[in-house]
Image: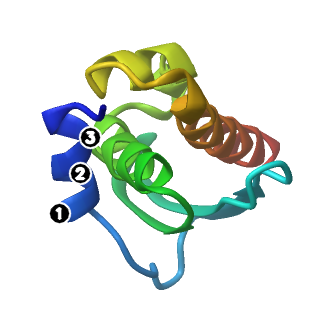
């Protein structure tokens, strides 16, 4: 049902936890399933130097949040818009239809971070 990549990110989440003094932090929720994702980033010289997440949700949501932090760390802020829910799902090895909301939650959190950074 789930890919090896998804199960690995769920069982061994990368960058999970709180971040002290982030440059930007957002919290996004999916009112349909109840998943909640908090994403925090530290930016230096226009590059995401560190990213952390906290997620209360299903297996796929936790895994997608973990993968997202890996995808954004080290990237220029102006390149974050290239990451979409489709690219997250694809990098995850695909998601079952019932879990597509997980990639969308991660992409929405990233979009909120980008919006917050551009407003600063």
Q: Which residue shows up at 55% across the image and 22% down it?
A: 97
First reached walking from the N terminus: tag 1 or tag 3: 3
Q: Taking 85 as reference, is 38 above or below it?
A: below
Q: Which mark is residue 12?
A: 1
Asked if labels 3 and 2 touch by Cβ distance under 8 angstroms, the answer is yes
Distance from the alpha carbon under mark 1 to that under mark 3: 10 Å
Q: On the image, numbered disc 2 is attached to which residue?
A: 9
**Number of numbered discs visible in the structure rendering:** 3
Q: Quadrant of the N terminus?
A: top left
Q: Secondary structure at mark 1?
A: loop
Find residue 102 and report its horizontal and vertical position in percent: 55, 40
Distance from the alpha carbon under mark 2 to that under mark 3: 5 Å
Q: Residues within 10 Å of mark 1 (few under 14, many from 20)?
A: few
- The answer to whether 8 appears left or right of 21 in the picture is left
Q: Taking 74 as reference, is 13 above or below it?
A: below
Q: Which mark is residue 49?
A: none
Front residue (pair 90, 26): 90
Q: Which residue shows up at 85% across the image and 53% down it?
A: 31
Residue 13 makes an appearance in the image: no
Find residue 95 and report its horizontal and vertical position in percent: 42, 25
Q: Secondary structure at mark 2?
A: helix
Asked if labels 2 and 1 touch by Cβ distance under 8 angstroms, the answer is yes
Front residue (pair 98, 6): 98
Q: Which residue shows up at 47% across the image and 21% down it?
A: 79
Q: Secondary structure at mark 3?
A: helix
Find residue 38 and report its horizontal and vertical position in percent: 61, 65
- The answer to whether 43 appears left or right of 72 in the picture is right
Front residue (pair 29, 114): 29
Q: Which mark is residue 6?
A: 3
Residue 91 makes an appearance in the image: yes
């Amino acid at each position: 049902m789930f890919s090896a990549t998804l199960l690995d990110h769920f069982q061994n989440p990368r960058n999970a936890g709180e971040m002290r003094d982030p440059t930007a932090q957002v919290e996004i929720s999916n009112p349909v399933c109840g998943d909640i994702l908090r994403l925090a980033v530290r930016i230096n010289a226009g590059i995401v130097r560190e990213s952390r997440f906290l997620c209360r949700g299903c297996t796929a949501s936790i895994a997608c949040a973990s993968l997202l932090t890996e995808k954004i760390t080290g990237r220029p802020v102006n390149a974050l818009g290239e990451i979409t829910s489709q690219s997250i799902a694809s990098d995850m090895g695909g998601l079952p239809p019932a879990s597509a909301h997980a990639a969308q939650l991660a992409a929405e959190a990233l979009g909120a971070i980008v919006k917050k950074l551009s407003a600063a």
